[in-house]
Amino acid sequence: MADLLQVTDGNFDEEIIQSEIPAMVDFWAEWCGPCKMVGPVVEELAKDYDGKIKIAQMDVDQNRETPARFGIRNIPTLILFKNGEVAQTIVGAYPKSHLDAELKKLL
């Protein structure tokens, strides 16, 4: 299984904003309980959408600039990008079926 892409303040624009395909970023932290529930779902979605949607994670404790730039106050927050623009922001832990339906809208 491919490891989930980990994005940082340093490579965020290159990996996500300039991505040729839509992208979803899971903003999370090690200490966040709901983030741990979302993590495995995000990994499954990364496999399901491999090559169609770029799926990445960002640790908000290690990276401060990007979460601030997107006004992230609560985690987990999932931001869906299309053509470098925010298409949707999902705050909180949702089941895979909900996230899957939102991702399909990007395609």
Image (spheres, grey):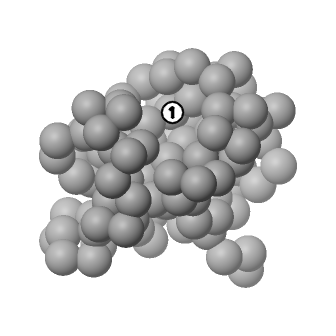
Helix or strand or loop: what does disc 1 sit on? Answer: strand
Label 1 sits on residue? 80
Q: Residue 35: give x, y in percent of width and height.
A: 27, 64
Q: Is residue 67 above or below residue 40?
A: above
Name the residue at 53% across, 58% down: 8
1, 69: nearer the viewer: 69
Q: Residues within 10 Å of mark 1 (few under 14, many from 20)?
A: many
Q: Is residue 96 visible?
A: no
**Count of numbered marks:** 1
Q: Is residue 69 visible?
A: yes
Quadrant of the drawing holding the C terminus: top right
Which image quadrant is residue 97 in?
top left
* Left or right side of 96 for 6: right
Q: Residue 51: give x, y in percent of width and height.
A: 82, 49
Q: Residue 78: give x, y in percent of width and height.
A: 39, 43
Q: Is residue 65 above or below residue 90?
A: below
Which image quadrant is residue 47 in?
bottom right
Q: Residue 17: give x, y in percent of width and height.
A: 65, 32
17, 36: nearer the viewer: 17
Quadrant of the drawing holding the N terminus: bottom right
64, 37: nearer the viewer: 64
Q: Is residue 78 above or below residue 38?
A: above
Q: Amino acid at mark 1?
A: Leu
Name the residue at 64% across, 53% down: 11
